[in-house]
């Protein structure tokens, strides 16, 4: 069992990421120095809460807005831990929301694309919705063809989490807690999950996860944000330049279930070890639905915060870097977006996802890092999104 025993504070994260930036050979730049925007004189780190409406079953939802001294804003709700807004500047200082989502709670209650929220108990897929633990076989919902996806019919993205603001000297955020009862979606064990979102003045949005259980269970959490660094709904992300710190990816079948084989990316359309636009070779993907939806194996030591991805939008200069402690990162290029209200009016490949996570179908793949969580252990992971501007 891989247990991440250290809980990273934001100052510790910043220090570690400086070291990671140096060691990475330039994949991830050092954190930018905090700077006020032209209208930012006197601006402070703040977290604001507002009413966001009531769910169909009568639960009140709160919207939180995190703002740093540079003017960057992050919005989220305690329904599913969903990111509703991430507003960052381009090279001219113009702020736009680069996170795809909806405008109303009712739309988030439907949320077929899984916009912006927390997926669990098991993110990504489990083959045939079935796994065996300690000699007992568990049958989960088959909500993705024959397979189980993102935790079942009612993922964590459609649960109401308790929430409290975080106010620290160097960051503001929200702490979310959800207790999943034994047998929910047919997973064993009462699971208590705590997820913390933090925004600091280095324009870093960190997500830290911790969870405990009272029975042996499996667990794989992630955030399912959709990004378009142009800030324009209606355009595609094919012109975005992507770099991935991954020498291999998981071979998958037509149902996106891993074969167990880790395939070298070198010389293929899967190779983003050096920057390539997402659209450059996307037609060469052979998964049957026209785009990337693959799990890459992140280089480096599992459990250590390390570079995973860097995305640049050349036209605006916006840059997003992703660091994670997780073994994998799922690249998804919005292949099922349809340009309809149900998909945020975004067209096919109108946004991309980079979901830091354990490898899909791990409970059925003993050769993969384990996703088992036992009583007395604490599941931990950290993922950081760092935003900057390329000159």
Image (cartoon, rainbow, N blue to C red):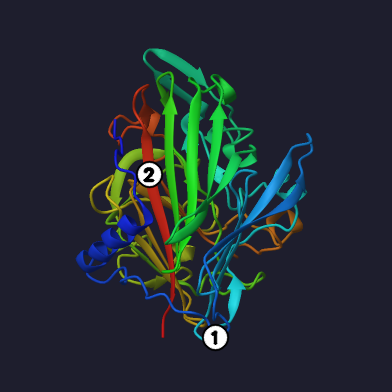
Residue 348 image-quadrant placement: bottom right
Residue 289 percent across, percent down from the top left: 55, 53
- Label whose residue precedes the other's in the sequence (1 or 2): 1
Residue 133 image-quadrant placement: top left
Q: Nearer the viewer, residue 196 or 247?
A: 196
Residue 228 percent across, percent down from the top left: 56, 67
Position of 378 with respect to 155 (left or right) is left
SS assignment at label 1 = loop
CA gap, disc 1 and disc 2: 36 Å
- Nearer the viewer's eye, disc 1 or disc 2? 1
Q: Which mark is residue 38?
A: 1
Q: Quadrant of the C terminus?
A: bottom left
Q: Residue at x 58, y 37 (%)?
A: 156
Badge 2 local density, few (<14 within 10 Å), some, or many (20+)? many
Residue 9 percent across, percent down from the top left: 36, 52
Q: Residue at x 74, y 41 (%)?
A: 60
- Check disc 2 and report the residue beneath it: 381
With respect to residue 164, does 36 lie above or below? Answer: below
Q: Which mark is residue 166?
A: none
Q: Are marks 1 and 2 in contact (CB under 8 Å)?
A: no
Residue 285 image-quadrant placement: bottom left
SS assignment at label 2 = strand
Total number of numbered labels? Answer: 2
Q: Nearer the viewer, residue 327 or 380?
A: 380
Residue 351 percent across, percent down from the top left: 57, 63
């Amino acid at each position: 069992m891989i247990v991440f025993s250290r809980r990273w504070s934001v100052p510790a994260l910043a220090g570690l990421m400086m070291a990671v930036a140096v060691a990475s050979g330039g994949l991830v730049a050092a954190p930018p120095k905090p700077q006020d925007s032209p209208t930012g004189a006197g601006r402070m780190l703040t977290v604001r809460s507002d009413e966001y409406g009531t769910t169909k079953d009568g639960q009140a939802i709160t919207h939180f807005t995190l703002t740093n001294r540079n003017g960057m804003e992050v919005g989220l709700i305690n329904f599913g831990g969903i990111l509703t807004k991430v507003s960052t500047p381009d090279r001219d200082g113009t702020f736009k929301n680069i996170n795809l989502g909806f405008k109303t709670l009712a739309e988030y209650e439907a949320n077929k694309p899984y916009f912006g929220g927390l997926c669990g108990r098991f993110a990504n897929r489990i083959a045939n919705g079935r796994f065996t633990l300690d000699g007992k076989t568990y049958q989960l919902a088959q909500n993705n063809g024959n397979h189980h996806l993102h935790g079942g019919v009612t993922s964590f993205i459609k649960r109401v989490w308790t929430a409290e603001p975080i106010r620290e000297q160097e960051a503001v955020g929200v702490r979310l807690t959800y207790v999943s009862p034994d047998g929910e979606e047919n997973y064993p064990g009462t699971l208590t999950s705590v997820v913390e979102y933090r925004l600091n003045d280095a324009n870093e949005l960190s997500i830290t996860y911790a969870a405990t259980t009272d029975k042996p269970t499996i667990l794989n959490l992630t955030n399912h944000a959709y990004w378009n660094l142009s800030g324009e709904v209606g355009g595609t992300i094919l012109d975005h330049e992507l770099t991935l710190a991954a020498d291999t990816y998981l071979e998958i079948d037509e149902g996106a279930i891993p074969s167990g084989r880790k395939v070298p990316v070198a010389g293929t359309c899967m190779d983003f070890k050096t920057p390539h636009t997402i659209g450059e070779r996307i037609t060469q993907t052979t998964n049957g639905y026209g785009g990337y939806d693959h799990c890459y194996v992140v280089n480096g030591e599992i459990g250590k915060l390390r570079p995973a991805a860097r995305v640049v939008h050349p036209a605006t200069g916006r840059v997003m870097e992703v660091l994670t402690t997780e073994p994998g990162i799922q690249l998804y290029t919005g292949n099922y977006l349809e340009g309809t209200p149900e998909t945020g009016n975004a067209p096919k490949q109108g946004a991309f996802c980079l979901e830091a996570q354990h490898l899909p179908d791990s409970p059925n793949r003993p050769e993969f890092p384990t996703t088992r969580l036992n009583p007395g252990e604490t599941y931990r992971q950290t993922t950081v999104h760092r935003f900057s501007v390329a000159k």
